[in-house]
Image: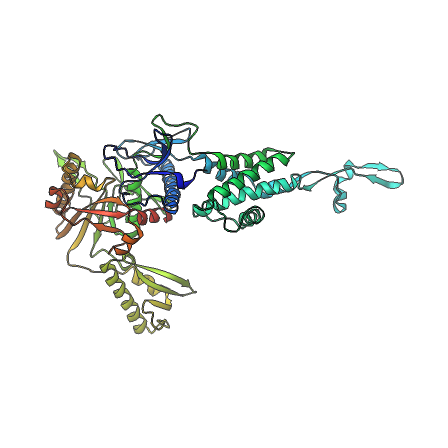
Amino acid sequence: MFNFQTLKLDKREDLDNTSSFVGIRKNENHEMVFRLPRGFNDFPDDDFEATKNLFFKMYRTFKKFERDNKSLQLDKQATGKDNIESGGNAYRFKDKEDTDVILYSKISIIENLLEAYKELSLDVIERKNSRNEELDYSKIDKYLHTATYLDDDVIYIDEMNLPRHFLNYQSATLIDLFCFILYELQNELEEETEERVKELANRFKAQHLSYDQSLFDEETFDSTITTLKDSLNDIDKITAYKDEDYWGLYEAIETFLYGELDMENTHEDGIFWGIDNFYQIWEDMCNTYAFSNFNVVYADTNIILNDKNIANNSFGGYRIFKKEKFKNPFFIEFRGKKRWMRPDLVRSHGEDEKFQDFIKLVNIVEHKFTSDFTVSPLVKENKYREICKRFCKELRRIKDIKKLPSRTPKGKINTFKNFSNEELKNLLNKGINLSSNIGIVILDWKYMDLSDFISENNKINNDISKQLCYEFSLKNSSVEKLNVESQFVIPYFYSKCDENKLEEKIGSFIDDGSLNKRILHNKIKVHKANFRVIQDVYLNHD
């Protein structure tokens, strides 16, 4: 396993290097380099914990992206991501723009260990049925057909098939070592660990390590790795009988302790682990966040939410999501034929929105017909706070009018006890008339650097023209007065200190006048979206 302390960071400071690769590979000096996503200029240097946490989150992100895109093969409808080819340690598939995307997701030092855990049973390794010279007299009747009959009605049975610890102490130590590594790894991956694994991991730590030693701690990494290697070598020397299960565990542990990130089948460009064209993951992350927090009426995506593909319509041969009441206006008609356009995502706010789009319930305790809960705004933004206050006021009004037994604890105006589940559900689904005008926001996910929006370039000019076409199509298709706004959303890393200063948890807009003049003239906003917050929603969403 590599040391995060020695892992070099590439923050894309070389503007001539336009590669969209994110991951780890070796540079010309054969050093392991972690190439970060765009917008990570302020990511801390020489910070063991920050680098470690980002690595494991990116690992989980790549794995989720891999699983989701594999499952699209089961969708009978046509999609740009259907064709996935697997070879070596890589997955190759086409994105919605028919661009090659190569995903190198298999890190043998981690994957082998997790696969060994799936395939092997701890109980099977620790205890197996084998021939045993000991006799269990309660089972003699099952062995009479194999017995030797002597004079005076005496029978002789020489052996039975009984459970036996045939690897004895060495087997138990190997399992304990395996469980210790597995437990440490699952902690970093934020996965649940079985109680049996915890028990054996703690047994190994108590016998071989000090109480403060950890596999992924900056101060104790080297000493812990050395101890684990010594333990594995000792086990291998004194273990006489080595069967298939033994070697399965041994090789998984050995690969983890001695292996590096280079794959058996590397790409000719030197990619060891990561993904080309990271923008595809960025789009899926943003779409997942949007569906979790906004009132989405249209989206050019087929992401998986709640174990189902979100796309429910097809236009121009592409699968998209469209709300039932939203009429798709994004087309250009010529001689009776329509050429469809596809903005990334369209969200609305106004008459169609409900209380549940702005508030969340926390600390929920459910009873048979009632619940205890605390009301909180979905994000830290003034509009959300105001709607949260309105929601709590409505709860208290319903409680008083219908004389519900619910109560509000003293000093906790946002906390409710024993509130009717039925009334709560009705209020959450109640529409809110926020304005006489309906607001529409057209979002364009951009995996680009901030500098790209300051200078003049053809790519941005084309994107601006597209946004103006989307705005024109929307306004031209509606008899109502629409407030239409366009936003470019780019990834950005905020430090903890900067996050505390943000008015909105999701990020901030660039409003210092430094943007491309055409962007400013057309009143298109550029939003520096909080990468960490969006990633957390992506990883924790079903």
Residue 384 as seen in the image, left or right of residue 63: left
Residue at 49%, 38% (x, y): give it.
113
Q: Nearer the viewer, residue 69 or 398?
A: 69
Res 273 visible:
no
Residue 243 figure quarter: top right
Q: Position of residue 336 (x, y in %)?
A: 13, 35
Residue 405 figure quarter: bottom left
**Looking at the picture, does residue 327 appear above or below residue 89?**
below
Residue at 28%, 71% (x, y): give it.
397
Q: Nearer the viewer, residue 356 or 123?
A: 123
**Looking at the picture, does residue 100 appear above or below residue 344?**
above
Residue at 37%, 49% (x, y): give it.
540
Number of on-image labels: 0
**Looking at the picture, does residue 211 appear above or below residue 450?**
below
Residue situated furthest top in the rendering: 268
Q: Nearer the viewer, residue 435 or 113?
A: 113
Residue 329 figure quarter: top left
Q: Position of residue 303 (x, y in %)?
A: 32, 42
